[in-house]
Image (cartoon, rainbow, N blue to C red):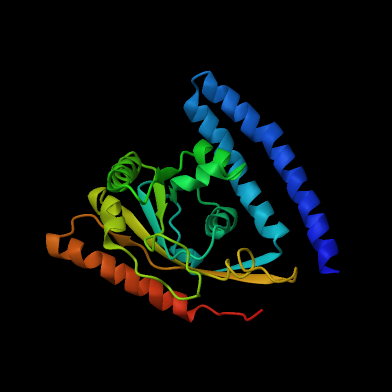
Amino acid sequence: MKYVHYFFAAILFVIGVIISTIFCVLPANFIRLLGFKKASKKIYWAWAPHLASFAIWLLNYKVSVNGIENLPKDISNVCFISNHQSLLDICAYVGKLKIKTSPIAKIEVLKAPFVGSFAKGIEAILLDRKSPKSSIKAILNGTKELKEGKSVIIFPEGTRSKNGKMGEMKAGSYKMAIRAESLIVPLAIQGTRSGFEDKKGFHRYDCNITILPPISAKGLTKEEQKELPSIISAQIKDAYEKLPVRKY
């Protein structure tokens, strides 16, 4: 029976890609070629929450959110910081929370069919982790985005957790939020990997998100700036470990 589910899911996925390409990717890229970059990005972002929700539905996920009251209504100059479990993390955040935020992503994402088009279309901040210059450039670009009133989401572990344990959250990832004196919103997510990279069957999967109280990076002393990454990382780790884990 599960193969029947996979068959229909594959058909729906292809249909979704075709519809998105016709009504989003092609017109947005055409407008970009004419020089209207902002309009092109708006088209991608108008489509992104629906596509992310479709991906969640297609993979048979139930996404639950704790602490929704901690999500700012105005996300200008807001830096979201999260642990990283799966490629599906950003879909869960954009699809469920409806936040339009530029993700910091590996440059390899551009090689992924269709996904690469969206990463480029929403102007994700891309970096090559093998290149120190690329990391510095990503921090500068992220800082610029935040100062311009946009929002950014960072995954300071740098790579997806493959064993369910949270990795070290690198302090350097917090630099852009500190330099832009952003409002930092810590996020914890659990369950996305089990239903995507480690998928077993087509039953309902659970994804749980916790939104922690925002912390302002404005007006911090040098000492407070130094301590901020460890404080937030500890909060995210504590929230992550409290999220329910379902064995499949």
Q: Position of residue 96 (x, y in %)?
A: 59, 58
Above or below — where is 49 with respect to 239?
A: above
What residue do we see at 41% from left, 68% from top? 212
Above or below — where is 141 with respect to 159?
A: above
- The N terminus appears in which quarter of the rendering? bottom right
**Along the viewing direction, whichever of 23 and 77 lies nearer the viewer:** 23
**Along the viewing direction, whichever of 195 and 235 lies nearer the viewer:** 195
88 left or right, relative to 70: right
What residue do we see at 57% from left, 58% from top? 88
Q: Position of residue 146 (x, y in %)?
A: 34, 45
Quarter of the image where one finds residue 125: top left
Count of labels shown? 0
Q: Position of residue 149 (x, y in %)?
A: 36, 42
Q: Residue furthest front?
A: 130
Quarter of the image where one finds residue 168: bottom left
Q: Position of residue 24 (x, y in %)?
A: 64, 34
- The C terminus appears in which quarter of the rendering? bottom right
What residue do we see at 54% from left, 30% from top? 40
Q: Residue furthest left?
A: 222
